[in-house]
Amino acid sequence: MDKQEVVGRRTAARRRLLAAIAGRDEQAMTTLEVCGRWTVKAVLAHVSGWSRWDLETISALRAGEPADLSALDDIDGFNDRLVAERSNWTVAQILDEMQQVEAAMNRLIDDLPAESLSVPAPLTCRYWDTLADWLLIAWWHEEEHAAEFEAWQAQAG
């Protein structure tokens, strides 16, 4: 898989995620549960937090610096922490973070040598073997939440 395909899939998933909540007001996004106990805002905080973690972790590993990988040891706890850290943010602030992180990640991907996507990732784990796999986890993750948002929208009418 080449860099353009990775970025294209990630970008399309982000568009789908945002389209699925378009037109909803802040109150609906902060009070109505859409994914278990999570509201749209909480899901967005979760997605944005993982995106930031991906960016920071990949950047650190590429620079030869140590990276905090504890998120992979306790994913549920990390999810809860991401949502809690952004609990006082507005939906607009979370969306702004998502946009900034996406732009930075796209720059990082653009700067990568093409062959780096297919060789073992700087960190391999049970979720991915290559950097392309790692980067596509976000594509799958946002597709999953976009589908939840779409189902919520359809149910809400």
Image (tube, rainbow, N blue to C red):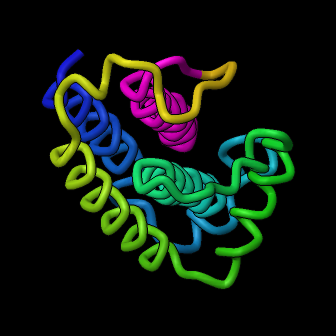
Residue at horizontal 44 percent and vertical 30 percent from the top: 143
- Residue farthest along the bottom direction in this orientation: 88
Q: Is residue 148 magenta?
A: yes
Residue at horizontal 34 percent and vertical 55 percent from the top: 22
The image quadrant of residue 131 is top left
Q: Is residue 102 left or right of residue 140?
A: left
The image quadrant of residue 9 is top left
Residue at horizontal 16 percent and vertical 45 percent from the top: 110
On the image, the x and y values in percent for residue 115 come to: 22, 23
On the image, the x and y values in percent for residue 80 come to: 80, 57
On the image, the x and y values in percent for residue 136 come to: 41, 27
Q: Is residue 98 magenta?
A: no
Q: Determine the main secondary structure of the stretch shown in magenta.
A: helix
117 in relation to 148, above or below: above
Which portion, as a residue range, is magenta? 128-157
On the image, the x and y values in percent for residue 71 come to: 74, 48
104 in relation to 21, above or below: below
